[in-house]
Amino acid sequence: MPGYNPSPEQESIYNLIPRYQAPTPKQALYRSKHKGKVDPKQYEMGVKKVQPAATFGHPYGMNSTSPDQFLKSHAQEPLLPEPHRPSTEKMRLKAPVPLKTEVPSMGLHSSKNFVTTNAIQAILSKPKQMPEDFRWTLKPEFGEVPQYLIKNKKQIAEEKASVEEHIRLRQQQDHDAHVTQMSEGERQQLLHDLKTKWATVNTAYQKLPFSLDTPAKMKRKETFEKQLTEIEKDVQLLEHGSTVLVLQD
């Protein structure tokens, strides 16, 4: 049937007819851009440019140095520039040495009598004036405190005050952090306990004998009196006001 194209999966007699296979196009043949033929004279042993003695080295005897080529003295010393006169001459601190052509005057004599001349100069000369002793008490600022001492004293006082203020603030912060207020129930309970303790100590104190003839009895009496005094102070402190602050250790 014209136009009928059954699929390979279906059974049909038309599948036995060989189908047309399109030929695969061939790619163009590769051709190098370089010439295929070269001149053999351009190459020696596979290398285009051959350096002299690059393969087997120099001929025998060519590696030895010439007897004239040896290290000569001062050959490696640096070449210094030619000396020239400095642009700024050095200042002479001493007089130059006299030349050998400068002959000193010799054989000169003087008729001056140095003894008489010295005596006359000593007689006519005035005595040397000694410097007067300087009186420091005549200075206008004598007895006054120097300005630098006043300035240093003021600076030290300011630094001391700032340090004390810093310490006071730190102590106040630490004190406020460890202080708590006692409640009214705790204050009443503490006051009741102190009064009970005072009654107990007072009872023991009243039972002491009248004669204190031994050191132990005298020490016991003093201990009871001290305890009673401390308890009375604590009771007065608690009864004085309703607000009690407790400092925690």
Image (spheres, rainbow, N blue to C red):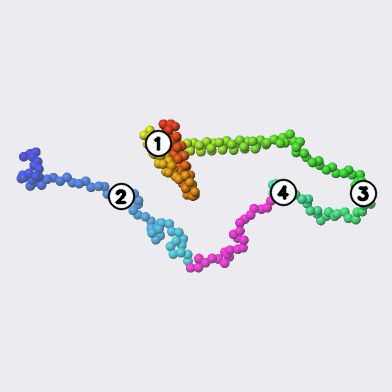
- Residue closest to the eye, 134 or 104: 134
Callout 1 secondary element = helix
Pinpoint residue 204: horizontal percent, then vertical percent.
Answer: 42, 43
Residue stretch rendered in magenta on the structure: 60-85
Mark 1 touches mark 4? (CB < 8 Å):
no
For residue 68, which numbered disc appears in the image? Answer: none
Q: Residue at x 13, y 45 (%)?
A: 20
Task: Please state the total of marks drawn on the protein image.
Answer: 4
Q: Earlier in the sequence, mark 2 or mark 3?
A: 2
Within 10 angstroms of label 3, few (less than 14), some, or many (20 or more) residues? few
61 relative to 222, above or below: below
> Image height check: is 78 above or below 246?
below
Give the residue at mark 3: 119
- Tag 2 residue: 31
Q: Which one is nearer the viewer's eye here, 204 or 239?
A: 204
Alpha carbon distance from label 3 to label 4: 47 Å
